[in-house]
Image: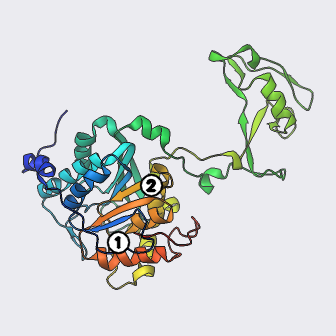
């Protein structure tokens, strides 16, 4: 497979192996002393190597929001590395993360156009091209951006898995948005709620004899499946659905039969790669969340909205699964994972591990009601 090369790449490919194993020293317990959550302050390369003996192949979902290398000056982290330095910084960390994620687990990496294409090349090399799941596009702004030649309104989230087939079988569907659900109506005031009609025909290629029969509409019309088609259900199933009031023959009662499907029966839809701000939040929302927690002075510059993290954690995990973020920033991943009943490990090198992450997670334990708290009915509890 072709490899990306850069100044210092050979040393970067060996860096993870050369990092010594370090002991993680307990400093403080917050909340429930039996909680299986860890907040680690220190260089994430050292921390990830220290976690390997205990957590190799045990992490269900990894999310990281590394510096985008936009050459911007931020108070809380360095985002101005020379390109080859950025690649050398990312490579060994991705190597260690690949050893921590379990089979069927996944890694989600936020990035923008500054280094996005190069990051994908690194992930292709480390996880294999067949480990690629998708590039999700997050609409980070809801208002027009006019400062650039072409307005920048999106970022990417690259998704990989060591076992894409297992990931596909185990990942969760996402709830229908109201825009998607608008086709479900209840014009006849059905007590079972909103519904839509689904065609009752199918291709006849693999049909059984039980899928060819006459249907009589309420108006008295006798219908058979169109040429090349069959009924999508057997006669016995059709008779049962008819007795349950689950067959719709159109407003006049003389159309081809359709099956009634209720909105309450829809478990969700397969995730798409387009994530609009109306569904997962935007940068303005995330700033308001962080200001509500810490005030405007000294606030973290580029937090992610809790709804964005909720979407990722929901798709990739189930309650009790382990979530890891080794670029924890202001603590959003840990806060959301905690509220959603997942176990978590967060790693942050900067002083804001103490000034932002610890107080934010204390507030989560105390039951703070910002972000997704109301949506997930968060009442507080737990510890780290």
Whole-percent x and y of residue 219? 92, 31
Q: What whole-number distance in Å separates the C-alpha atoms at marks 1 and 2?
A: 17 Å
Q: Residue at x 82, y 38 (%)?
A: 250
Q: Residue at x 21, y 62 (%)?
A: 23
Q: 151 or 357, which lies in front?
A: 357
- Asked which secondary structure carries label 1, the reply is loop
- Return the residue at label 2: 312
**Res. 127 visible in picture:** yes
For marks 1 and 2 on the same chain, the one whose residue lies earlier in the sequence: 2
- Asked which secondary structure carries label 2, the reply is helix
Q: 280 or 147, which lies in front?
A: 280
Whole-percent x and y of residue 344? 39, 60
**Color theme of the render:** rainbow
Instruction: Name the side, left or right, on which 244 lies relative to 370.
Output: right
**Res. 142 visible in picture:** no
Q: 224 or 336, which lies in front?
A: 336
Q: Quadrant of the C terminus?
A: bottom left
Instruction: Name the side, left or right, on which 281 lies relative to 353.
Output: right
- Return the residue at label 1: 330
Above or below for 234 versus 23: above
């Amino acid at each position: 497979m072709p490899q990306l090369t850069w100044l210092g790449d050979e040393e970067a490919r060996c860096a993870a192996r050369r990092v010594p194993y370090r002991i993680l020293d307990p400093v403080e317990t917050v909340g429930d002393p039996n909680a299986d959550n860890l907040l680690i302050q220190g260089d994430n390369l050292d921390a990830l190597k220290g976690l390997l003996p205990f957590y190799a192949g045990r992490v269900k979902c990894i999310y990281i929001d590394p510096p985008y290398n936009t050459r911007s000056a931020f108070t809380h982290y360095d985002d101005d590395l020379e390109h080859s330095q950025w690649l050398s910084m990312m490579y060994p960390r991705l190597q260690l993360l690949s050893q921590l994620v379990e089979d069927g687990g996944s890694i989600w990496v936020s990035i923008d156009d500054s280094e996005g294409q190069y990051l994908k090349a690194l992930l292709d090399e480390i996880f294999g091209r067949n480990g690629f799941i998708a590039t999700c596009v997050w609409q980070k702004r809801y208002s027009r951006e006019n400062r650039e030649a072409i307005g920048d309104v999106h970022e990417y989230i690259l998704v990989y898995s060591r076992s894409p087939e297992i990931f596909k079988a185990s990942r969760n569907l996402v709830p229908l948005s109201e825009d998607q659900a608008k086709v479900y109506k209840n014009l006849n005031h059905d007590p079972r709620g909103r519904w839509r009609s689904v065609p009752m025909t199918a291709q006849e290629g693999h049909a059984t004899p039980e899928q060819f029969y006459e249907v009589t509409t309420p108006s008295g019309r006798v219908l058979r499946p169109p040429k090349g088609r069959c009924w999508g259900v057997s006669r016995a199933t059709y008779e049962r659905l008819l007795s349950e009031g689950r067959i719709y023959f159109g407003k006049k009662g003389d159309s081809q039969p359709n099956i009634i499907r209720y909105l309450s029966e829809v478990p969700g839809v397969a995730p798409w790669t387009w994530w609009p701000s109306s569904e997962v939040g935007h940068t303005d929302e995330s700033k308001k969340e962080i200001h509500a927690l810490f005030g405007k002075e000294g606030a973290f510059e580029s937090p992610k909205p809790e709804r964005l993290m909720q979407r990722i954690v929901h798709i990739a995990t189930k309650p009790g699964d382990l979530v890891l973020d080794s670029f924890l920033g202001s603590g959003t991943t840990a806060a959301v994972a905690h509220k959603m009943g997942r176990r978590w490990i967060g790693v942050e090198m900067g002083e804001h591990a103490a000034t932002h992450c610890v107080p934010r997670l204390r507030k989560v334990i105390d039951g703070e009601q910002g972000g997704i708290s109301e949506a997930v009915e968060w009442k507080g509890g737990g510890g780290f």
